[in-house]
Image (tube, grey):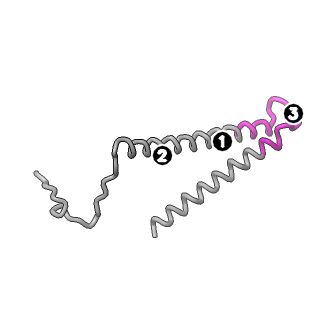
Amino acid sequence: MQNTKIKSARILFAAVFLLFSLYSVFFTVKEADHECCGEDCPICFVIQIAQQAFKLLLLVISSFVAIKAGIFFLQKNCGLTGIKVSNNKSLIALKIRIND
């Protein structure tokens, strides 16, 4: 139950972040040729924020892809695999000796 809530929250966060990013791109495209009122133009300020958000999105996506590619490379070429241990086994079943 807890795992499904976390998964749902992650999906919701990703969807909101993606929608925000797409809205920022469309806003920038639509308002690119606006009549600028000078140095303190609020539309130019919002466009700058939208451009920064888009750059952040690209950084996050490229970092995620690089990490996944690195993990895949290490697993394929170096033979690294995860060791899975069941939580219901005792220390004796795992043959672990604990010295005090």
Q: Nearer the viewer, mark 3 or mark 2?
A: 2
Magenta-highlighted residues: 27-49
Residue 57 relative to residue 49: left or right: left
Badge 3 or badge 1: first in the primary sequence: 3
Mark 2 falls on what kind of element? helix
Give neighbour class at mark 3: few <14, some 14-19, many 20+ (Cα, 10 Å).
few
Give neighbour class at mark 1: few <14, some 14-19, many 20+ (Cα, 10 Å).
some
Horizontal and vertical percent position of residue 69: 48, 43
Amino acid type, label 3: Cys
For image coordinates 78% across by 36% down, the residue present is: 44
Mark 1 falls on what kind of element? helix
Where residue 28 is drawn, which disc sits there? Answer: none
Amino acid type, label 1: Ala
Q: Are marks 3 and 1 in contact (CB under 8 Å)?
A: no
Q: Residue furthest right?
A: 35
For image coordinates 80% across by 42% down, the residue present is: 29
Horizontal and vertical percent position of residue 83: 30, 54
Badge 1 or badge 2: first in the primary sequence: 1
Amino acid type, label 2: Lys
- The image quadrant of residue 34 is top right
Q: Tell me the residue that label 1 is attached to.
A: 53
Residue 40 vs residue 7, the one in the foreground: 7
Q: Tell me the residue that label 2 is attached to.
A: 68
